[in-house]
Every structure is written in structure tokens, then in C-alpha cells.
Amino acid sequence: MKKSRDDYLTLFFISIIGFYILISLAFPMYAILSKSFENKDGDFIGFENYQSYFENSSLVYSIYNSLFVSIVTMVITISLAFVFAYALTKSRMAGKGVFRSIAMIPILVPSLLSGISLIYLFGKQGIFRELLMGYEIYGPIGIIIAEVFYTFPHALLIIVTALSIGDARLYEAAKVLRSKSIRTFFTVTLPSAKYGVISAAFVVFTLVITDFGIPKVIGGNYNVLAVDVYKQVIGQQNFEMGAVVSMVLVFPALIAFAVDRIVQRKQVAILTSRSVVHEPNESKTFDRIMFGYCSVISVLILTILGMCLYASLVTFWPYNLTLSLKNYQFDLMDGGGWDSYYNSIRMASYTAVFGTIAVFAGAYFVEKARSLKTGRSILHLLSMMPMAIPGLVLGLAYIFFFNHPDNPLNFLYGTMAILVICTITHFYTVSHLTALTSLKQIDNEFEHVSSSLKQPFYKTFFRVTVPISLPAIFEIGIYFFVNAMTTVSAVVFLYSSKTTLASVAVLNMDDAGDIAPAAAMGMMIFYTNAAVRIVYVLITKKILVRFQNWRLKTA
Amino acid sequence: MEQYLSVKNVAKYFGKFQALNNINFDVNEGEFVCILGPSGCGKTTLLRVIAGLESQSEGTIQQNNNDISLLPPDQRDFGIVFQSYALFPNLTVKDNISFGLKTRKQNRNEIDSRVDELLKLVGLSDHINKYSAQLSGGEQQRVALARALAPSPGLLLLDEPLSALDAKVRQHLRLEIKNLQKQLGVTTIMVTHDQEEALTMADRIILMNNGVIEQEGSPQDIYSKPTTAFSANFIGTTNLFKAKKISSNSIEIHGSVLECNDNINDDVSTVTIRPEDIKISDSGEGKNILSGTIKELEFLGSNIRGHIEVNFESDKAIVLCNFAAEFIQNKNIQTNASINISLQPHAIKIVKE
């Protein structure tokens, strides 16, 4: 068939977005892979680096440590989150909205903030250190507690979704057949949530094994892979070994990613459009137990956050407990001062704006373009790749790729732009999936009608698709913003003295022993993200309703 | 009438599956053609090929003497209404209808008057500022029709436009669309799986099955002169029998020799007899008389359909035949009663397997 103007435009935009992902992901990943086969002079030496890696027992022991904390965290988080999700979806307890909001708090703070909080709670001068009965918080115990806090909301979101698709008709059938509620749980609830639970487990596993903020802050001498990458690069300037450890780290992340994709595909198959939403029955005892459980979890989450808040306001822990804003005088400390905070705001805003545009446009072409089937499949595949790459590895790959003297994009190195590019790419896949889900709900025939009416696709895009998708677009923007504020791993290798960031400042101040200011900076990130969330809710409630009144049944 | 659209030798493959096989037909200017067939017969694929939403693997399509085979949809001249209507939910009725008008550099007054004209045409003038969520299914359908007609396309394509509606609304809209089409004289192709819809609306029916055209003709012809067993069976209800040629005007069914009017070819294998063409013959008068037992009486409103176990020469077989409800009541006919029927010679139609 002949190509129309729309087809050429589609090709043009698909190429731009595809090219962006190539430059920001595929090329750097190639750079880091080849670096792991080179010596310091850049000569190819085959597997020599890998050989010396596996001969170094302390480095290899990190693999075991990483797997240990990741698996233990996975088991604990999934168990806790499953019951919490079960309470949110299958009980009629009071305060579901509040519990849900509290459970989401960890998403709004950098992962290492929970580590800092644990130091105040259980460290050498901690309030509850006796509770550990002689055990050290610095090490696997601290890492696991902090990682559970950090991964809890991620697991919860996935499991809640999985549990809420349980088809009410199945529950009714079970009831009519006089199935006992425990049997209903094992024959109806669990099977339909199975894939969600598996998916959540792998997401948690990946988050933990690739996280380096928490083990850095509270790991003590307990080495894990992610910290090894950081130490090899920042501490010993051994980039080649950093590349090798990165590749070792990518391996489990890739496997987890692959399993998750397979499982997700099965999940979709159960969800039919005819499913009826299940409304839980009232059971006072059950509701009370669930309420109690959720209260305990919420108190724990609030304690970790509250400890940080308190620590950031105390003048000099533990000797002078009068409250002051002394720790918020960031300009007096290392880490870049208040400029770091403002840089973070700028970085997060750029990421939100440009990331949302790129992701939504990309998803639109993948889902809605009429022609270029192959091109669209390639773009979709490229869009899925970032999820498989740990942020730390991506950041290191950027050094090798963008800092290479022969790279014409070398000028980006050390700028705000490279931070934004890296962050957009790091969080691209989840946003892409959100956009796809939203676009899939829009009738594909809109595009067909428009072309029969001789209208260019961009007119339909701006007049129909974008307005309908506004809620999803805002959701993606917020996701980018919040993650750009909290991310450490993706940007820790890439900031310069002019582009220090708040999340990195938390890390560096903690490293320098300024733990209270680190907590204060972490809280600044929390205040900002919480404020953005609240503003978002107000916007969706008030302003979006005005633009979305076409959803109402009556005029 | 002048030929407007011409589909020649069109084939479409999806991988190894052949969805369309050597499709040939013409549509005259101003004609209303229905493509009718069971689901999966390829009718929607054919419509999408005509629209350019799907590209044919082989063959050509000419519209208004231009070869449009390779043109993308936005360079073809058609308006389309989908089963889902695909109304833009965030635009008002007015903005939906004027969506296709705006790039044509018409001034606002022209656009407004065109929208008014179309709304009047479909009888929705009061709903101009409503959104589609605020309209009934039938109203949405009419807005979609008005939107498709707004740029005055040379060809109107309707993809199962009525199948999402309630039975009553559907009957009403059938007539309305048909009248609108006549009034505007726009050449129309409608795809449907509903034979009643096709029979009442179409000037001509193209009956499809398994990717090929089974039969093509006026609704009357398709109904009363089916050429294949599929046509006879798909449209209305019928009795199909395996048959053998006996002479130039007689055949054998289940061992019974029957007289018929059709010219009998040597390769006769199947005949069809419509239930309404079968007469009851109390007195045993008439031709092709067979005896049987009423096994079941099915109430269809004004008619009653009898399932009659007929004693053919070699074995028994069920034959369906229609009676007037009044007749059954007057004669007080019950199940298990014996009855004589006449398979009238002119009612026996020879079809291809």
C-alpha cells in the first residue's frame, strides 16, 4: 500500500523515540559489556577480568550475600503485603483509604532513608537497641528490615490489583456450593491472585538485589553486589572490575525480569471484561483482626518515617534533644547544600515533563499507529528493556558511553541533561506499561474513523486521545517526578559539582557522618513528594473533573 | 445505473489462513449492497479491504473509475460507521459531526449549517451539545451516521451498525437508515450477519461463506432461488434433502420418486424445500403426496411450525412445514396426529452442495 503523510510522520516519530532508547540504553549497555572484557589500557583481554573476579573470594561472597538478603526480604515483604492487600480488598474494615496512603509512604522517600532511621532506632545510640538482644543492626538484619520497608508498597500495589480482579461470580458459585471460607480462599482467591503474587515476588527480589542505598548506609561490613559496583568505581577507580560486577548483577535482574514478563502475560488472560467486581461480606471478627494487623504495619511504617522526622529536628542527637532547624542548614555541610535540593526539583520536573511526553507518544505509536507493524514491535521491545537494567549499572554504563572522548554526545557528560536522560530511561518501562494500559482502553476505531474523515492522526491525538488519557498522563508524570526525586542508583555516577542532587546528598552526608542532616534532606524529599501527591489529588478532584465532564451520564 | 465500485479478484491471507478467496463484485451508483454471512466468513475483512484499513493480498479495487487498491484510507473517499460507533467521548455531538469538516477550510457558518442540516436529517437537533455518554444507543448510532455523512463521501460503509442495539430500536433504525440512504442517494455497503436486516434493507445481497461469495442477487432472488445448500439454509429455514436424478423432471429422495419443475441436471445431489411451500393435503389430492406423523408443533406467533416424521419409501425423515395458526386451531390438530403433505413440484429447488 502507498504511504500517506500519516505513515511518514509515524515512521519519523517512531524512529526518534526508538533512536532515543538506543542511545540512552542499548549503546551504553554495549559499552559497559565491552568494558568488562578490557584491561585498563582498553585492550581486549577476554574473560580475564571475570577470572580475577571469581578468584577474589570476598567479591564472590557478595553474590551469596545479595541472594540471601534478596530472598529473605522477598519472603517477608510478600507475606506482610499479601495480608495487608487481603485486608484492603476482601474485608470491610474501617480506614482502608488511610491504611493505603500510609502504606504508600516508602515510595515517596529515598530507599536509604529507612536505613538512616534504623540507625537512630537500633544503632549504637539507638532508642530501642536493647530489642536486638545483642545483635548488630549494621549488617543483614538492618538491610532486610530497611528493604522490607522500601519494597512493601511496590509489592502491595501489585497484589492489591491481583486480588481485586477476583471474579465475584466465582465467589457466588462457591457460596451456592456451600464451600467453607477457608476452602474458598484456597480454590478461588489464591489461584486468581497467584500470578500477581509471583510477579510481586520477582519485583521485590529485583528491587533489593539492585538497591545500593540501604546496604551502603546500614550494611556495615556486609558486602553485597550493588555496593561492590559502587566501591570498585568510586572507591578504587577500578572501572573494569565495576563493569564485571555490573554484569554479574544484571544476570539475576534479567532472569527476574523475564519471569515477571511471562507471568504478567498469564495474568492478563484471567481478566475478562465480563468479570464482576467482588464485594466482600461483612464479618466483624475478621474485620477487627484485619484492622488490627493493618494498624500494626502502619504504626511500624510511621515509626520509621517519624524517627527520621524527629532526628532531623533534634539539635544534637542524643545529647541535646531540643528541637531546631539546625540540621536543615545544608549550606553548612558537604553534599552540595540547598542547591542539591533545587537541582533535584529541576531534574524531577524536567524528567516528568519530557519523560511523560516521550513515553506517552511512544506508547501511542506502539498501540495506535496503523502502519509499520514491525517498527512498532521493535519500539515496544525497546521500551520494555530498561526495566531489566539496574539503575546503578545504567549509570555506570553512561560513564563508559558518554564520557568516551570519541563520542559526539560527550558534551552531555556532567550536565543536567544526562541526569534527566538517565532517569527517564531508568523509569521508562513502568510508565510505558501504564500508558499502554490506558491507551488499550480507547477504541482503536477512533483512528480509523479519523482517517476516513481525512483528518491527520495528530488531530485525533490532541483532540481526543490526550484529553481522554489525561488521568493516565498525570499518573505517569507524578511517577517520574517522585522517582526522580528519590533515585540514587541511576544518578550517583553522573552528577557533577554543579548538578548535585538531594538524594545523592543524603548518601554523601551520611557517608561523611552528618547523619542528622542526611535525615533532614531525606525529609525534604518526602515533604516535596507528599506535597506533589496532594496537589495531584486536588487537581484530579477539582480541575480534571471540569475537563472530564463528558464522563458523566447526565448533562 | 452506473457502476461505482468494482472489486476484482480480491484475496486476503493472514499467514496461511485465507480469509478472502477470489472475490469479485460490482456496486452501482446509489445502490445499497449488503454483505451477509456467518461470523468468520470474511465479510468484515472485505469491508476493511474496501476501506483500506486492511490491504488485500491479491486483486484490485476501483472506485469511480480510479484504481484505489494501494491508497491508504485517508486518500480514499468513504465514510464509515462501526459497530461500536467509535464516537469521540470527550467531544459533543456537534464537535463529533464537524470533526471531518474543519480542515476543509470552510468557514464557521458553513460548518454550523452543515451540522444543523445533518442533525435535522437524523432527527437529533435537540442533542447538539450533549456528549455520547448522555445519548441512548440508537441516538449514538445516528450521530455516528451523521459524522460519517458530514463530508459527503461517495461511499458509505456500515460495519454491523445495528447489532449492538435492542430489537425494537433496531427495527426502527433499519427503515430509517434505508430511507436516509435513498434520500441522499449515497452508494452504501453494509456488513451484517443478520439475514432479516439484509433482506429488509438491501437492494442487493452478497452472501459470503468461508471467504468466498456463495450467491449474489436481490433479496427476493436470494430467498426464493437459492443456488447453493448454504444459501438455502442460511436465509430463512428450509428442508434439505439428498437427491438422485430419475428423469428430466423427477428425482428420488429417501427412495420416494417426486415430480419437479426444475430442469434436472445429471449431477443433482441436493434439493431444498421451504417449509411454507409444503401444503397439507387432507383429501390426498395434489402431487408428491406423502404421509407422516406430527412429532412436534412449534409456536411462532402467526404461524405454527410442524416437525413431521414423513414415511418415505426407504426410511423416515423429519420435514419442517409451516401452518397458519388458525388452521391448526380450526382443525384441532395435535401432536402424534397422522397427516398427508404435498411436496409441490414447483417448491422443489435444486441447489449445489
Image (cartoon, coloured by chain):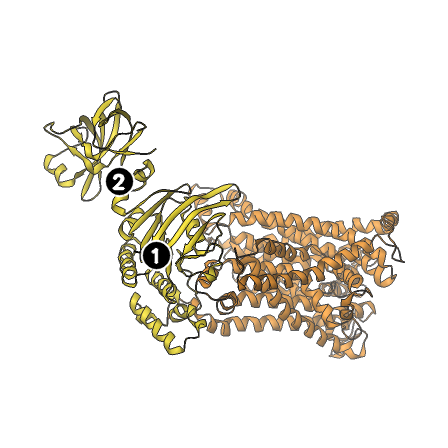
The colour of chain A is orange
Q: Can see residue A193?
A: no
Of the numbered discs 1 and 2, the one sitting upstream in the chain is 1
| Quadrant of the snapshot with the C terminus of chain B | top left
Left or right of A139 on screen, residue A471: left
Crowding at mark 2 (Cα within 10 Å: few <14, some 14-19, many 20+): some
The colour of chain B is yellow
Q: Amino acid at mark 2?
A: Lys
Residue at 57% of width from left, 66% of height from top? A475
Residue at 65% of width from left, 47% of height from top? A259
Q: Measure the alpha-carbon separation of dots 1 and 2.
A: 24 Å
Does B194 appear above or below A509?
above
- In the image shown, does A387 or B39 lie closer to the viewer? B39
Crowding at mark 1 (Cα within 10 Å: few <14, some 14-19, many 20+): many
Q: Can see residue A338?
A: yes
Quadrant in the rendering for residue A177? top left
- Expressed as whole percent of the image width and height from the top left, the position of residue A205 reads 69, 52
Q: Does dot 2 land on a helix, a strand or a loop?
A: loop
- Expressed as whole percent of the image width and height from the top left, the position of residue B71 reads 48, 58
Subunit of label 2 = B
Identify residue for label 1: B188
Q: Does dot 1 land on a helix, a strand or a loop?
A: strand
Left or right of B344 on screen, residue B216: right
- Expressed as whole percent of the image width and height from the top left, the position of residue A99 reads 57, 62
Q: Are marks 1 and 2 on the same chain?
A: yes
Identify residue for label 2: B225
